[in-house]
Amino acid sequence: MDRIILKIFIVTISLCCSFNVMAERDACDFSTSYDAGVSKKFFKRLELGLTESVSLNNNSSTIDKFSSKADVSFAVIRKMFKVGVSYYAIAKNRHDDFYLNHRFQGYTNLKYDVNRFTFAWRSRYQMTYRPEKELEKQWINYWRNRLSVSAKMPKIALHPGVAAEMFLRTNNYKGNEISKMRYEFFLKYEFDKKNSLKLYYQYDDAMNVKNPKDVSNLGLAYQFSF
């Protein structure tokens, strides 16, 4: 058991170091995120969730945003395919003033298990309303596609995994382009059937935008399900 945990720790550190080397090549900010969520299932297929989050930027020295997410999903095929919608209320810090942004999302999530591995594809369309912006820039829309693979470790409720996500801007008057790629490594530990904790590291590679700035993000997320 100790050897398994040690190997996972070594892999985690190695991947984080690799991402940091990438980050040093360009302008990059180090941010941190903290999430706490609760969810409840009804009729074994319908699930309601609420998540509270806080994010820090500028090398984790200032508050970037507070957000509250309400989510509703339905398992079309149990443990394999679900659809859902969600709403985010985001208090975004812009020049030491907080502005309330609204984000609406619709998504599908497809999972497939092979032995101890889980392969997943999440497709999400999101629209964010930013009233503090100029009229022509108030809405920013993305089509996001995320591929991930995770594994269940033997004799311990630990699930390491990796993921990659593409952000395609869909309402850019200059033309729709991929504006960001997100790479992620995560470790999820299940204390029991209701409580889990996830440690994740993300590297956002900005592209096709004015003054691109990459972001290196370390996050911690707690989830309670009942």
Image: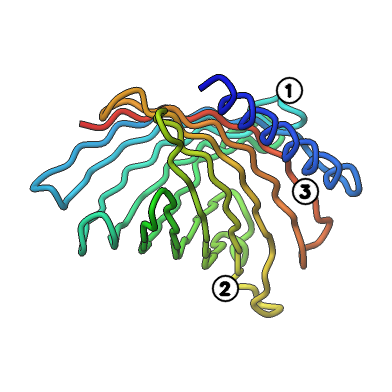
x%, y% of residue 36? 41, 28
Q: Nearer the viewer, mark 3 or mark 2?
A: 3
Is residue 55 among the parts visible in the rendering?
A: no
Residue that mark 1 sits on: 61
Q: For residue 51, which numbered disc appears in the image?
A: none
224 or 117: which is nearer to us? Answer: 117
Query: In the shown orientation, is residue 67 left or right of residue 213?
Result: left
Q: Quadrant of residue 49?
A: top left
Mark 2 lies on residue:
170
Mark 1 → mark 3, Cα distance in angstroms: 17 Å
Specify which label sits upstream in the sequence, 1 or 3: 1
Residue type beneath disc 2:
Thr
Q: Is residue 69 left or right of residue 221?
A: left
Tell me how far mark 1 sits from mark 2, CA to CA. Answer: 32 Å
Where 141 falls versus 58 (above or below)? Answer: below
Front position in the image: 195 or 179: 195
Q: Reply above or below: 141 against 201.
A: below
Discs 3, 2 touching: Cβ within 8 Å: no
- Residue highlighted by disc 3: 214
Return the x and y of residue 181 as percentages of the image width and height: 67, 59
Residue 202 is situated, as x and y percent measured from the top left of the image, at 65, 43
Q: Earlier in the sequence, mark 1 or mark 2?
A: 1
Using the numbered discs, state the Cα–Cα distance from disc 3 to disc 2 in whole angstroms: 20 Å
Residue 29 at least partly seen: yes
Residue farthest toward the top in the current orientation of the protein: 2
